[in-house]
Amino acid sequence: MMRSKRLNVARAAAATLLACFGIIAAQSQQLDEASLIRRLDAAVQARFDNTVGYTVTERYAVYRNNDQIHPVAEMTVRTTYRKDAGKSYTILSQAGSEIIRRLVLKAILENEERINQPGNREGAWLTSANYEMKLKPGGAQQLDGRECLVLALTPRRKAPQLIDGTMWVNAKDDSVVQIQGLASKKPSFLTGPTQMMRQYANVSGFAMATHSKAISNSPLFGQTVITIDYKDYQVQIRPAR
């Protein structure tokens, strides 16, 4: 009888101890998540504060239906970003369908100019002001040779430039490695939900886009795939004080 009581007491103590460990682990997870989100916000703000401007060459390609080898329209532009003015574009070359270049590619450039104007650009940042962020279970993942923490992104409002999906963050320096998901708002009533992906690399100490891909489907036009490749960044960093 006494032995049974002792066993019951020991089991109860073990269960209490395990519950305490579970609570501590959950609290630690929450603290780690909150700390990571604060660091991400700080990294985005530091990029904005310290990047005076940059230029980059961007190659746009549009593919239709199942052919992702032969683009129906292409455009290469030199993008110039200035902190006090936003983005501007110079077309270096273009080929393919004039209609698609005008209705699709030039529309993308005009939208990017609008989004990046002072007062607008903060609304597209990958920060907790625009997204609810949750650290996904399962620990770090390897992506492009980098150990990454993985967060679920839920936009706080619906907008074509905000993604409902996943973000991979470099565990060493908190820089964004990749985002992927669905645009939270359709860019047009003529298209279905847009699948979006963007990859980043560390350029001059900050995360800069290297490749983007968007896939949309329409009952009228079928599937459209748009890719953007970024190269030859020239970044102007604010001098250290």
Image (cartoon, rainbow, N blue to C red):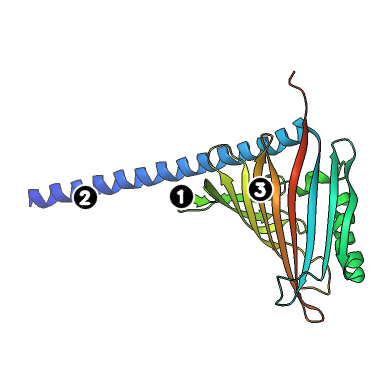
Q: CA distance from mark 1 to mark 2?
A: 31 Å
Image x and y of residue 37, in percent: 61, 41
Between marks 1 and 2 in the image, the one whose residue lies nearer the viewer: 1
Disc 2 secondary structure class: helix
Which residue in the structure is indicated by mark 2?
A: 11
Q: Is residue 193 visible?
A: no
Quarter-wise, where is residue 165 in the image?
Answer: bottom right
Relative to 31, residue 98 above or below: below
Which residue in the structure is indicated by mark 3?
A: 200
Which is nearer the N-term, disc 3 or disc 2?
2
Residue drawn at x 15%, y 50% is 7
Indicate left or right for 86 with 217 as reference.
Answer: right
Q: Nearer the viewer, residue 109 or 127?
A: 109
Q: Nearer the viewer, residue 63 or 132?
A: 63
Indicate left or right for 103 with 43 as reference.
Answer: right
Q: What kind of residue is marked 2?
A: Arg
Q: How many neighbours does mark 2 have within 10 angstroms: few (below 14), some (14-19), or many (20 or more)? A: few
Q: Which mark is residue 139?
A: 1
Q: What kind of residue is marked 3?
A: Tyr
Residue drawn at x 38%, y 47% is 22
Image x and y of residue 103, in percent: 90, 67
